[in-house]
Amino acid sequence: MEFIRHLVWLLIFPGFVFTVVVGLYACWVVRKVTALIHHRIGPPVLQPLYDVLKLLGKQTMIPEAANKIVFIAAPVVGFASVLVLSILLLGVDFIPSQNDMFLGDVIVAIYLMVIPSLALILGSSASGSPHAAIGASREIKLVTSYELALVMAFIVVIIKTATFQTVSDTVGEVHLLSLSSIAEHAPVFSISGLLAFLAALLCIQAKLGFTPFDIPEAETEIAGGVLIEYSGALLALWKLMQAIMLVALPLFLVILFMGGIGSGIGSILFGIGKYVLVLVLLILIKNTNPRMRIDQALKFFWFYCGPVMALAIVLAMLGNVYDKWWL
Amino acid sequence: MNWKIWSLKKSPWVFHVNTGACNNCDIEVVNCLTPKFDVERFGVTLVGSPRHADALLVTGVVTAQAAPRLIRAYQQTPKPCVVFSIGACACGTGIFRKG
């Protein structure tokens, strides 16, 4: 019985099926809101599903110059890691917590969030195309530029939530990094938390490959860049991976900064509202900004986001010391 | 109906091959993506690589220079795919018939 329940968690809710359905729906939301901003009508609701079905039905071509094993393994690895990440994040919200079960912490989530980018780099460098090589090199530079600011934003959250926990004293120090105890607080309503949220939002934008930071994909310059040689079922896997990232990454921000989704119908609706808010913010940034050059992106994340995040960490620590929650 | 063909009809991704056109047909193609006509309603998306494409939009007389490239682009497109010839030049060599 226990086994069947775990299997249902993994495969149906909140596992594979649920995540893919929500991911495709989020994908449609992105395209529809983009269309509305352009004063267009936009695609029908099932359009992402049609796309994936069509790609699954098409021939999969593997270029002669490609390293076959890495070329095929990369999308599988990326897809699997994103799926695990989203199950972990949804599990924090929907699976009732048990003491003997490890539901993952911030560190696990950070690792799982890097793997899709690494898979993208591996897959595109294995495909043996000069465009994909340029895309891979840009992706490497982009990862090195945003990752520091993102982790610093998470550190702010950990510092902020740690104070609350010592005050309430319900959880031991071991659980400082656990997602479910972080999800009980909403650090976005403080100065350092707000700064960290804004920086993390921009880093998530870069992670999703949305427009000001879609430098590795840059359709007008390098024609799709990292994914250029992929076709058929492997491209469908990449598309599904990007769709699930649209669920996982905004949800991660909601859990870290806005107090998670919680249980009970009211708080679930409220939580979905928070998720949609983050998603629409991402889409608005995507549609109102031109693409940066890679050196501009690097400069932006290291010279602007980095010092601001350092300031936010100092503010959060001062808030801890002087017991001011709003700092 | 075969589900592969059905889903292909629902989301045709197009790749644009210019084989010596004067750019007018290219503008016509791009014009379809604008808010006025908005072919994304029907799932049509312009993609940057023939590997992602389901339909090749060929414009222009296929010149001797461009012919081998067009064949390569067709070979690189995963099957099933379709080829559209767009405009008078691509359909019947147009004003270049005698020359």
Image (spheres, coloured by chain):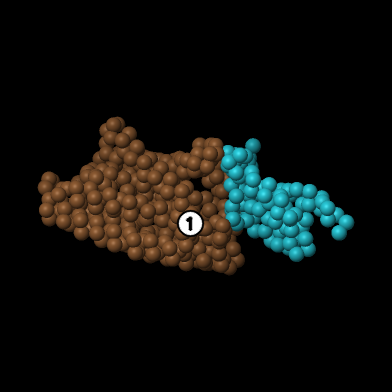
Colour of chain B in the rendered structure image: cyan
Q: Specify whether residue A218 is in view.
A: yes
- The residue that disc 1 covers is A291
Camera-nearest residue between B97 and A173: B97
Left or right: where A219 falls relative to A117: right
Q: Position of residue A79 (x, y in %)?
A: 43, 53
Quadrant that contains the N terminus of chain A: top left
CA neighbours of label 1 inside 10 A, class few (<14), some (14 to 19), many (20+): some
Q: Position of residue A257 (x, y in %)?
A: 28, 47
Place of residue A309 in the rendered image (x, y in percent of width and height, measured from the top left): 28, 58
Q: What is the three-letter code of the residue carrying label 1?
A: Arg
Q: Colour of chain A?
A: brown
* A173 vs A281, nearest the viewer: A281
Q: In which quarter of the image is residue B67?
A: bottom right
Can you say whether A276 is above or below B24 in the image? above
Along the line of sight, which residue is nearer the eye, A212 or A126?
A212
In the picture provided, is A36 more to the left or to the right than A1?
Answer: right
